[in-house]
Image (cartoon, helix red, strand yellow):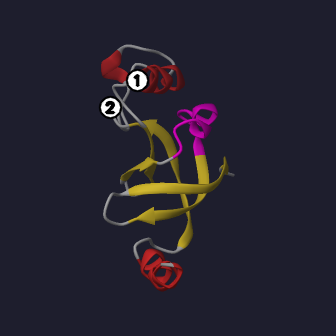
Amino acid sequence: MRRLLWMSLPLLALAQGPVREYRGVITDTMCGAGHAHMGIQPDEKCVRECVKTGKGKYALIDDRGTMMVLSDQQAPERFAAKRVRIRSVLYEKTGILRADSMAPAN
């Protein structure tokens, strides 16, 4: 059994992409880049409310406009509607980012 586990580890590594840096804005999956239609201001409050109600999940919108859901749904709260840089692994099949670190972008 142990041997099978050790043999499968390289396959697990291939299922995810490499660790790289992503830059963008923390948002929610319900509103995406535009929060005006919700009528909740400021944008950071809208992001938090959408996630809190369960209607959205924290996500990153990168500079190309691609939205990627974040696996950690607690850490992004303090960066709601703010520009960040994230060292992360992107799981290609699901489009989910597993953030290893998150900080304000310069």
The residue labelled by disc 1 is 50
Q: Is residue 72 left or right of residue 105?
A: left
Tell me which residue sits at (47%, 86%) in the image.
Answer: 7
Q: Residue at x 48, y 25 (%)?
A: 43
Q: Is residue 79 above or below residue 16?
A: above
Image position of 68 (left or right of 100)? left
Q: Is 39 situated above or below 59?
A: above
Spatial CA span between label 1 and label 2 = 7 Å
Residue density around tag 1, few if under 14, some if 14–19, many if 20 or more, within 10 Å: many
Label 2: element kind:
loop
Q: In the image, residue 80 lies at what x, y percent?
A: 55, 33
Q: Position of residue 48 (x, y in %)?
A: 50, 24
- Asked if the residue under mark 2 is in contact with the one under mark 1, i.e. CB atoms within 8 Å, the reply is yes
Residue 30 is tagged as 2
Q: N-terminal of the two: label 1 or label 2?
A: 2
Q: Quadrant of residue 35?
A: top left
Q: Residues within 10 Å of mark 2 (few under 14, many from 20)?
A: some
Check disc 1 and give the amino acid type.
Answer: Cys
| Most foreground residue, 47 or 43 | 47
Looking at the rendered structure, the kind of residue marked 2 is: Met
Magenta span covers which residues?
72-83
